[in-house]
Each structure stands twice: as structure tokens, then as C-alpha cells.
Amino acid sequence: MTNCKDIEEKLADWLENQLSPQEQAQVESHLKQCPACQQEWQAMQQVWMQMGQLPVPKPSPAMKIRFEAMLETYATTVEEQQTYSPRHLLQLVKQLWQSVWMPRLVYSLLLISIGLGAGYWLHKPSDSQISQYQHQIDTLSIQMQEMRQMMLLSLLENPSASERLRAVSLTQEFKRVDPKVIKALLTTLNNDPNVNVRLVTLEALAELADDPSVREGLVQSLAHQDSPLVQVALADIMVKLQEKRSIELLRELLKQKHVDGTVKSKIQQTIKELS
Amino acid sequence: MFQVKAGDLNKMGLLFERYHRKLFSFLYYMTGKDDASEDLVQNVFFRMLKYRHTFTGEGEFKTWMYHLARNVLADHSQKNKRSVLHEDVQNYSDRISSGAGADDSIYKEQELITLYDSLGKLSEEYREILVLSRFQELKYEEIARILNTTEGAVKVKVHRAMNQLKNIYLKLEQ
Ligand SMILES: [Zn+2]
């Protein structure tokens, strides 16, 4: 036989109608033979149902405006500041800590600073030591590049167009570009709402056109662009790269009704130059 | 789901759309103050932005959000001593009156005001568990994760809180 304490835990589910049939039966049989519980549970159930009738407290419409202002301020001040301060670097290091190469980067930094410190302060470094440091510094700079690429990837997602422009401009410092970065740049080229960002991205990608995946992406992008500015710039690049694969897509573009008149003549000229 | 972590502040707007009403209601029931609750919601979203890199993606986003909300609330209560929900009962009864349908009797309105007043007299601990289960519509399992306890303990606490609420309510009704 169940006592009052045994079913204490069941009230919560009982109120929400979540009891299994067996538990339901167990509770009912207890309530039937225990008038005290019966009275208590019914009263609690009534209050519970009444709680459902309380109006839902609602925030004022100003709430959303304030939130958006906060977000904007955050994006332009806090994040910006961090990008240039040591605090940001520290945070970047923290964020990247889990990636495989990060511990190695910190380790190399340590080695080099210890090495340089000891080398320069205690005695003049030998040539072999110097070349060793040089090697370490080279390795480090490759790792710094990887870090920059990660930064670029996160900046590209920034809601502020000027931040995204900054991200694209980072590509100039790269010797070797990661496929992930190329993919992100191509996505930006095809989907960024801001025309300026798309144009700058196009320029940056044109510089990387030695990479076959970039070339391929640029050709395919013809099908995605609706801004006359970007279409014309793309056509120019196709000529510069002598990309004959683009001819077919350019012809497709000509068939579309919404294409601007000057863009049409530009495309016709491009096709002529390519064939 | 939590792409905000990668630095996409746009996603923050979506999260705001989705959760700010729920958060406001939670904080309103805990503080009894409109303005303060709006500030606190803002505060929660600010912390989400600031600490988004600490959200590991393990465990649900909602749990993390309520953790932040409870921290913000704790800071607030410390500064403002005990929350006194019932002081705002006048304000709240205005809401109830204006929100009541045509066939709602004055009698029923009075009942709801009494109920609200009773909630204000409940200890914060008990009020919180009822707000989470009844008004935030969270599962007991989710509440357990938010409060860092077991589901069984949550259910027992709901029982005790309901019992106390009912007693306060009956007393006030007399
Ligand atoms: Zn009993």
C-alpha cells in the first residue's frame, strides 16, 4: 500500500498529465482512500489551472530597439577594439586553443623567446644558432598565417560590411590560401548583400586565380550575380584569365531579360574576345 | 545550432527574436519590475555575446541561457536585496483588468490578482521552480539541468512549492 510520501514526486507529472497509466492508477487509488491528500491535490490542481490564466507579461516594443542598438555598439566597439589590442590576441589564442596546431604555436613562441633572450643576453649567438632561430621564425610565420586565415573566416561573418571588407583585404598577406578560405570567399562573392564587398572579394579572388578551384568558382559565379557592376567586373576578369569555359554561361546571361543594356553589350564583347 | 560562437552577430538577432519574450517573462516573475526586467534581458543577451566562446555546444542552448539569466538575476537581487514581487501588484492588476475578456467576471479578476499576490509572497526558490515549470513551459528534465539537480528533486520541489502557494492563496482569499 502506498503512503502519502510515496506519491509526493508524482504530483508534478499529475499536474501536467504526464503520468503513465500504472502511475495514474496508483495515484488514484491513494487519493480514493486518503481524503487529506485528495483535498490537497485537488486544491493544488485548481491553483495550477488558474496559473495558466494569468496574462503573459510582455516587454515594451522599445526592448527590441535597445537590443539592436546594443548589438550594433558591440559589433563596432568591443569587437573592433579587441582586434587591435593584446586582449584580443589573447582571446584569439583562447578561441583557437583547441585547434591542433595552436599548442605548437605557443610552444614555438616560448622556445624562440627563450632562445633569443638567452642568446642575445648571455653571449653573441653563433651562425648556426641564428639559422636555427631563423628556421623557427619561419615556421612561426606559417603558423601566424594560419591564424590570420582563421581570423579572416570569422570576420567574413561579421554583420558590418566594413569588417567584411577588412577580412577580404587580409588575403593580400597570404602566401598560400587554405581551401576553406577560398570556399568562404566564393560564398561571399556570390551571396554578400553588399555590392562593394562582392567587388573587393572578386578582386581578391582574381589575384588567387592560379588555383584551379578559384578559377572554377569565378566562372560559376557568373550565374549568381545580379548587380551590373559585378557582372561587368567578372566579364573583365574572364578576358584577363582567358577563361573559355565562361562563354557558355555568358551566353546564358545574355538570354536573361533583367540584364542591363550596357552589361549586355559588354558581355557580347567579352564573348567575342574569348572565342 | 550555436553559430554565434563563430562571430556571426546576425545569429544573435535570431536568438533574440526567439527567446526574449520568454526571458522577459521569467525575469518579470522573479523581480516584479517591468523596467528592471527589460534591463536584465538586455544584460543576458550582452553576456551571451561576450561569453559566446564559452558555450561549448554540449548541452542545450536553452540551459546555458537560463544559467546566464539566473546569474544576472543573482547580481541584481544582491544589489536590490530581496525581490518584492507583491509591491508591483497594482501594476499587474492593471494588466489583468485590461487583458480580461468580456465574459470574465470581476470575481475572476479578483482571483487572479490574489493568485499573483500569492506568487509574490512565495519564497524565491519556490517561485522560481513554478515559473520555470508553469510559465516557461520547461520539462522537469530541462529544469533539472538548469538547476543542476535531479528530475526527482525537481518534482518534489514542485509539489512543495504548489502546496505552499495553495496555502498562501487560500489564506489571502478569506
Ligand atoms: Zn495521502
Image: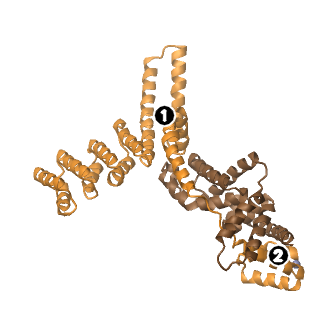
Chain colours: A orange, B brown
Is residue A204 depicted above or below B42 in this figure? above
Give me the C-alpha separation between circle 2 and circle 1: 61 Å
Mark 2, residues whose alpha carbon is within 10 Å: few (<14), some, or many (≥20)?
some
According to the picture, the residue beneath numbered tag 2 turns out to be A7
Residue A26 percent coordinates (x, y) = 80, 82
Please tell me which residue lies in front, B35 or B101: B101
Query: In the shown orientation, is residue A182 left or right of residue B23?
Result: left
Disc 2 versus disc 1: nearer the observer: 1
Q: Residue at x 44, y 49 (%)?
A: A159
Query: Disc 2: which chain?
Result: A
Mark 2 vs ligand 1: CB below 8 Å: yes
Query: Residue B75 shows which numbered tag?
Result: none
The answer, for residue B89, to whether it is visible in the render is: yes
The answer, for residue A245, to whether it is visible in the render is: no
Please tell me which residue lies in front, A190 or A69: A69
**Quarter of the image where ligand 1 sits:** bottom right
Q: Secondary structure at mark 1?
A: helix
Q: Do marks 2 and 1 both belong to one polypeptide chain?
A: yes
According to the picture, the residue beneath numbered tag 1 turns out to be A84
Please tell me which residue lies in front, A174 or A135: A174
Is residue B51 depicted above or below B65 in this figure? above
Residue B8 percent coordinates (x, y) = 48, 50
Query: In the shown orientation, is residue A261 left or right of residue B173?
Result: left
Res A225 → quadrant: bottom left
Q: Secondary structure at mark 2?
A: helix
Q: Amino acid at mark 1?
A: Tyr
Mark 1, residues whose alpha carbon is within 10 Å: few (<14), some, or many (≥20)?
few
Query: Is label 2 in contact with label 1 (beta carbons under 8 Å)?
Result: no
